[in-house]
Image (cartoon, rainbow, N blue to C red):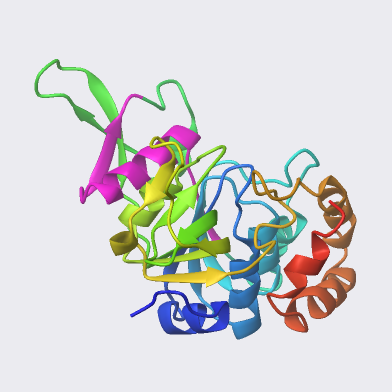
Amino acid sequence: MSKVIPLERAVRENLKDGDTVAFEGFTHLIPHAAGHEVIRQGIKDLTLIRMTPDIIYDQMIGMGLAKKVIFSYAGNPGVGLLRRMRDAIENGYPRAIETVEHSHAAMANAYAAGAAGLPCAVFRGYKGADLPKVNPDIKSITCPYTGEELATVPAHRPDVAFIHAQKASEKGDVLIEGIVGVQKEVALAAKKVVVTVEEIVPDFKGLHPNLTILPHWTVTAVSVVKGGAHPSYTHGYYARDNAAYLEWNEISADRDLFAKWMDDNVLKATPEVFAERIKGL
C-alpha cells in the first residue's frame, strides 16, 4: 500500500489532541505546511519539541494549540523575538504555556537517545551553566569508568514527527539534501513520522550514495506539498523568503493583526497555496 496520501489525511490520522510532536528542520526544510494543516484542524493541548522554535511555533502557540514547549533557542531567525510565544509566557495569551529550555547539544543528544531507544542522553555539557537551576530535567551522573561528572537529560520520544524533504521515492524512501539538522534522529525517535516533500520520483538511482535517505520503514506517511517549507528554503528548489521573516515581526506584534493574517493565510488556505507563494523566489 502506498504511503503517499494528502497532507490533510496524514495529519488527521496521525496526530491527536494532547500528543507530543516535533516539527524539525534546521535553517531550511522547516515543515511550515504541515504546521499550518495542524492549525487548520485545531489539534490542541500539544507538547511541542523543537531545537529552534521559530515562526511556525509562534503561529501554533499564538493559535492556542500548545500547552508546553521543549526547546533550545527560540526566535524569529535574523530578526528578533517570537512575539506570540512571549505573549503566551508573559501574559497567558491566548493561554499559558509551560516551557522547558535546553541547550542545542542537549536537544540533539536527546533526539539521538530516543532514536537509539535509550531512556536518557548522557553527554558533556552544562558545566558552569545556569539552565540546570531552572530546568529540573537536567541532571548529572558520575561515569562508572572514569569518575567524570556528565550531564543527562530525558530522551525525546515524540508521538509524531513532521519533517520536510526534497524527494520521496514511490516506495516511500525519503531523500534529504543540503543542511541536515536532526531530521534523521527525530524520525527514528518518533512513534510516527509524516514527511512532506517537493516531489515523488521513481527511485534515487544516480544520486550520491552519501545523501541522507530515510528508508520507507521509518516513515508513516508522505505528502506532496510543493513549497511546503516556505518561508524557509528547500535546497535545490527555492530560496529563503527573507521578506516574510521581516514581515512576521510586525504581524506577530499585534494580536488583531496576527489573527487576521492567520485567518487569511492559514485557516482559509490549503497546502496548494504554498506552490503559489514560492513563485518568483
To which quarter of the image does residue 230 belong? bottom right
Residue at 28 percent of width and 39 percent of height = 121
Q: What stretch is highlighted in magenta?
A: 98-124
Residue reaching furthest front?
Answer: 206
| Residue 23 shows in this picture | no
Q: Please count the marks in the image.
A: 0
Which residue shows up at 85% across the image and 72% down it?
Answer: 261
In this image, 149 relative to 263: left or right?
A: left
Question: Which residue shows up at 36% across the image and 38% down it?
Answer: 109
Extreme-left residue of the structure: 145
- In the image, is residue 208 part of the stretch drawn in magenta? no
In the foreground, 154 or 89: 154
Q: Quadrant of residue 145?
A: top left
Nearer to the camera, 173 or 70: 173
User: Does residue 264 appear anywhere in the picture?
Assistant: yes
Please name the residue shown 83% across and 69% down the image. 258
Residue 127 image position (x, y, % from top left): 40, 22
On the image, the x and y values in percent for residue 31 come to 59, 59
Percent x, y of residue 110: 35, 44
Q: Where is residue 34 in the image (x, y as percent from the top left)?
A: 59, 69
Q: Locate residue 174 relative to residue 267 in the image: left or right.
A: left
Taking 64 as reference, is 131 above or below it?
A: above
On the rendered structure, is 244 left or right of 73?
A: right
Q: In this view, does 1 lie above or below 82?
A: below
Residue 219 versus residue 169: which sits nearer the camera?
169
Note whether 255 is above or below 82 in the view shown: below
Quadrant assignment for the N terminus: bottom left
Q: Does the magenta stretch include residue 103?
A: yes
